[in-house]
Image (spheres, rainbow, N blue to C red):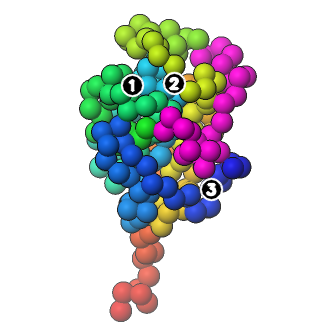
Amino acid sequence: MSSITAGQLAPSFNAVTFKGEPINLEDFRGQKVWLAFHRWASCPLCNLRIKEVRARYKEFQDQGILMITVFQSPPENIANYVGKDDPPFAIITDPDLLLYDIYGVRPNWFGLFYPRLFLRAIRGALAGYLSLTIDGPLAMIPADFLIDPEGLVWKAYYGQAASDHIDFDDVVAFGNDRCLDMPDNPVLTK
């Protein structure tokens, strides 16, 4: 499938978390959703990103944002790596890359050669995140989608490098956007 763009209806899906819990995107209508695609469960870059998200997740929750992450790993590998600290958000297992395909998330070998990628990989390794098991394409590039309560994509972000995710400032701006709120209009309140 081609890339998703802002204003487009987010493609619906049924999936399962690494804990075996079903997830249907349609069940989250009426809520703001941050759908984040990562690489494999032991990827040091991905684990470092999850650590950074966890550090700010309460802030995002307070803004009404629900996060769903997707990894190209099987459930047991997610449980052994990125899921071992029981993150406060859902982690979908997608080893067949079905959701990656629906959302147009693709591998890109050029994304492995960005200079800042190497520094980030070193930071991840120094933080104790070592890539021992690679599940799926080595060159998968992350992507993030901010989905409004009506199910429309507020912002689609396709990374350029293996460590490239949406900026947290964009997530905060999404949380601050009133989306479905009615504008202040005295005619509507009479």
| Residue 58 image-quadrant placement | top left
- The circle drawn on residue 6 is 3
Label 3 Cα crowd, 10 Å radius (few <14 / some 14-19 / many 20+)? some
The x and y percentages for residue 46 are 47, 25
Contact, CB < 8 Å: mark 1 with mark 2? yes
Q: Horizontally, is 127 left or right of 155 in the view?
A: left
Left or right: residue 93 compared with residue 134: left
Circle 3 or circle 1, nearest the eye: 1
Where is residue 107, by image quadrant?
Answer: top right
Vertical arrangement, residue 149 with respect to residue 79, above or below? below
Q: Secondary structure at mark 3?
A: loop
Looking at the image, which residue is at 39% across and 25% down? 77
User: Local crowd at mark 2 within 10 Å, few (<14), some, or many (≥20)?
Assistant: some
Q: Sequence-wise, which precedes: disc 3 or disc 1? A: 3
Which comes before the other along the chain, label 1 or label 2?
Answer: 1
Magenta region: which residues? 94-117
